[in-house]
Amino acid sequence: MACPRCGSLLDVQYEWDRLPAPRSLRDFEAKWARRQDPYCFSGVWRFYELLPFAPQEFCVTVGEGQTLLQPSDGVGEYIGLKSGRLFLQYEGLNPSGSFKDNGMAAAFTHARLIGARRAACASTGNTSASLALYCAATRLMRAIIFVGSGKIAYGKLSQALDYGALTIQIAGDFDDAMARVKEVSQQLGIYLVNSVNPFRLEGQKTIMYRVLEGLGWEVPDWVVVPGGNLGNSSAFGKAFEELYQLGLIRRKPRLAVINAVGANTLYILYEKQKVRWNDGQVARQTVADYYAQMDSEGRRASTIASAIEINRPVNLDKCLRALQWCQGLVREVTDEEILDAKAQVGAGGLGCEPASAASVAGAKKLVAEGIISPDERVVCVLTGHVLKDPTATVAYHTTDQKMFNEVLGRRGVRRPAFANRPVSVSNNLEEILKAIQLYG
Ligand SMILES: *Cc1c(COP(=O)(O)O)cnc(C)c1O
């Protein structure tokens, strides 16, 4: 999936003037009326004309992308925004419970196009859950997934196992698993569906089309997204740049990518060392030196937000390009800020996994810094479902000090601001009634 000459990742480019490009974004709305057609039902293929890399009859769908942009004043207040200004794009509603299904529909389509029989990925969990689901549901391919041992949330691991994927646990972390899966897929000729795969990003562009649709085709002021391997942020930038070049939008939103403090490569490179896309002239040596320094210090990614626990983001260059296209910036947030934000998303009635809440924690930080103004229109992407990582959620709310220490304490989380403690009582009616009177 890389250029044999320069080693950079491949990128999908269209010859728009030879394609029947849509004249207006509103044309896509008409497809709602035809949703008994799977290609109109799919939240990815509904926008086929904006990612036409395969003949339509090859396009794979399991009903992905039925996700909604939801206004959320409760979470907006927490962030510091005025009423009606915050929207949450809830990608947890996808078939496998994360935004990864958008990209998987597209990558699977390409794999089918070239006749692949086996597909592999390294994963912090959600890519493997998605791949395993697509393999099981379509029976087109066999799924082989690589995960770091002890590094995957139970909700995600349970999905991969249930869907029947060949699951290989490597003694190491995501960055190790990623390096190995590249070697293995090259040696055995297995189709690789990690976000090094440029077609994944094509599918993930549609998340932003649905955001625009949710806003009546108006462009928000900010899109805030967690950054792990940086596939999403890269895809969002590409989506907006293409719409802009096609004359379908008149301006682009600003993009904010949020790292966890324990996995902050993009933050350091972009905000501290000022590495820029620079029209393709990325300061390679600065990046190489930083990676060498991480290695010599034996530094490993470490955050409760396991989906973004990545120190060597494979889409670094494309993300830098997106940051240039969308006047972007990068922030880092602590695990404590992430978990507090996550509890607020839950209290707002949606719920998400820790990595997703980085977007909300990051937006809050940017409002506090005065960079996002309280009356700007902000979209935070909630990348994964609350049930993906029940361990983190229960540890946050629990009264069990041992569990808290084991899961959160060792990551420097001290005081959960919004813990909803379970109340323990003996099996005695009077005590139960008393507890309800006391706390209810
Ligand atoms: C994969 C994933 C991310 C990170 O997205 P990238 O595109 O790798 O930056 C964030 N949140 C969740 C829930 C994920 O599954």
Image (tube, rainbow, N blue to C red):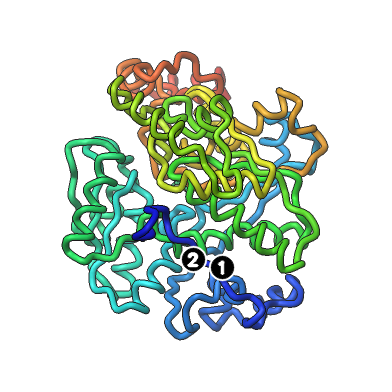
Q: Is residue 378 above or below residue 394?
A: below
Instruction: Write the residue at 17% across / 37% down.
Output: 171
Three-letter amino acid code at disc 1?
Answer: Gly
Towards the viewer: 26 or 179: 179
Instruction: Write the residue at 59% across / 34% down.
Output: 330
Report x, y in % for residue 118: 23, 68
Q: Secondary structure at mark 1?
A: loop
Instruction: Write the residue at 29% across / 78% down.
Output: 115
Instruction: Write the residue at 27% across / 59% down.
Output: 120
Does the residue at mark 1 contact the one at mark 2 (Cβ under 8 Å)?
yes
Disc 2 target residue: 64
Report x, y in % for residue 404: 36, 20
Q: Is residue 95 above or below residue 153?
A: below
Disc 1 target residue: 43
Q: Seen in the image, is 101 located left or right of residue 242?
A: left
Q: To which quarter of the image does residue 142 belong?
A: bottom left
Q: To which quarter of the image does residue 344 belong?
A: top right
For marks 1 and 2, give the CA distance.
6 Å
Three-letter amino acid code at disc 2?
Answer: Glu
Q: Secondary structure at mark 2?
A: loop
Q: Is mark 1 within 8 Å of ligand 1?
A: no
Of the two numbered discs 1 and 2 on the same chain, state the one appearing first in sequence. Answer: 1
Tell me the tag on residue 188.
Answer: none
Q: Is residue 342 visible?
A: no
